[in-house]
Amino acid sequence: MAKRRIAHDPQQFVNTAADRRQLQLAVQTALPTNAHVLARNFARSSASSYWLLMLDQPHATPNSLTLRIADHTLWLANHEQLAVTWEAGDFLAVRETLRQHLTPQILQQYSYHFTTTDIVTLRLILHLEQHQLIWLVKLSPTIAKAYKNQQLDLLADFPSAKLLLGNMNNSSLQLVPVKQPVFQQRLGQFFGRNLLFSQFTSHQLLRLLPTNQWIRPLLQELPPTPNLEKQLAATYGTQFVRIYVEAIRQQAQLQAVGE
């Protein structure tokens, strides 16, 4: 499968600790008083960075916002991210750009609130990862072949892609088809918020892995969700729960054989 060509100078990847501190400072000084950075992550092969912002709400759970700072457009369409373009390394300019974009009106437009269903779904994703299980989607041949040079529309393409539950370390092992449109729609939403990140594999598969450095601190900020399995069954159906419980059981058997 063809790899995407990087058009800019590798020295502009902004991967040194000093560069990241400068970018962190630029973001923090541009934020309004009701916002703070909860988590962030930096791309290894480009000048892209992603920031999970928390926006304080009077007498309510904070809203969240995904901020993307990059020198190229995102390959996902219909994502829930506030995207800011910058020239890699120009920290003063990006700070001013951020100040222009991080207005109360724009923050309100791009922010989102996590429902109870969102929270239990995030907890399920982490629970499955602990058992070496992740979600995958099978892309169309056109999108898979183009790698990231062909946009993946999270509203038009993602919901119709085949959803699979599979082994985290071997994408061809124990692939279980799952048909649950409401759950798949929510996965696409999380992907568009950078709560999941992707890896291309063979056979047109896209692995969706949890962005742990975001989800774990986020769940500490959000209300607890007792009776997780009961809530998941009420939301997605008992058959959905049976599928992932059986997948966990089979995964445990495979690990036992391997040991």
Image: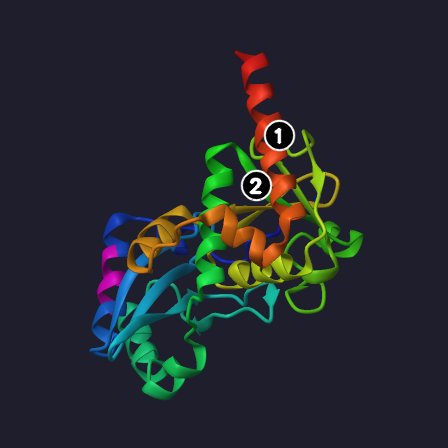
Q: Can residue 196 be seen in this view?
A: no
Kindly identify the residue that appears in the image at 71 percent across and 63 percent down. 157
At label 1, counting other C-alpha atoms closer than 10 Å, the crowd grade (few under 14, some 14-19, many 20 or more) is few
> Image height check: is 210 above or below 107?
above
Element on which disc 2 rests: strand
The image quarter in which residue 136 lies: top right
Main secondary structure found in the magenta portion: helix
Tell which tag, 2 or 1, sits nearer the viewer.
Answer: 2
Q: Residue furthest bottom?
A: 105
- The residue lying toward the viewer, choosing from 220 and 101, is 220
CA gap between label 2 and label 1 equals 10 Å
- The residue lying toward the viewer, choosing from 253 and 72, is 253
At label 2, counting other C-alpha atoms closer than 10 Å, the crowd grade (few under 14, some 14-19, many 20 or more) is many
> Image height check: is 28 above or below 137?
below
Residue identified by numbered label 2: 134
Residue identified by numbered label 1: 170
Percent across and percent down for residue 74 are 55, 65
> Image height check: is 30 above or below 106?
above
Q: Can residue 223 be seen in this view?
A: yes
Kindly identify the residue that appears in the image at 60 percent across and 44 percent down. 241
The image quarter in which residue 201 lies: top right
Q: Give the range drawn in magenta.
A: 21-26
Kindly identify the residue that appears in the image at 28 percent across and 68 percent down. 91
Under mark 2, the amino acid is Ile
Percent across and percent down for residue 183 are 61, 57
The image quarter in which residue 57 lies: bottom left
In the displayed structure image, the side of residue 180 where residue 40 appears, left or right: left
Is 90 part of what is drawn in magenta? Answer: no
Element on which disc 1 rests: loop
Under mark 1, the amino acid is Asn
Percent across and percent down for residue 26 are 25, 68
Q: Which of marks 2 and 1 is nearer the N terminus?
A: 2
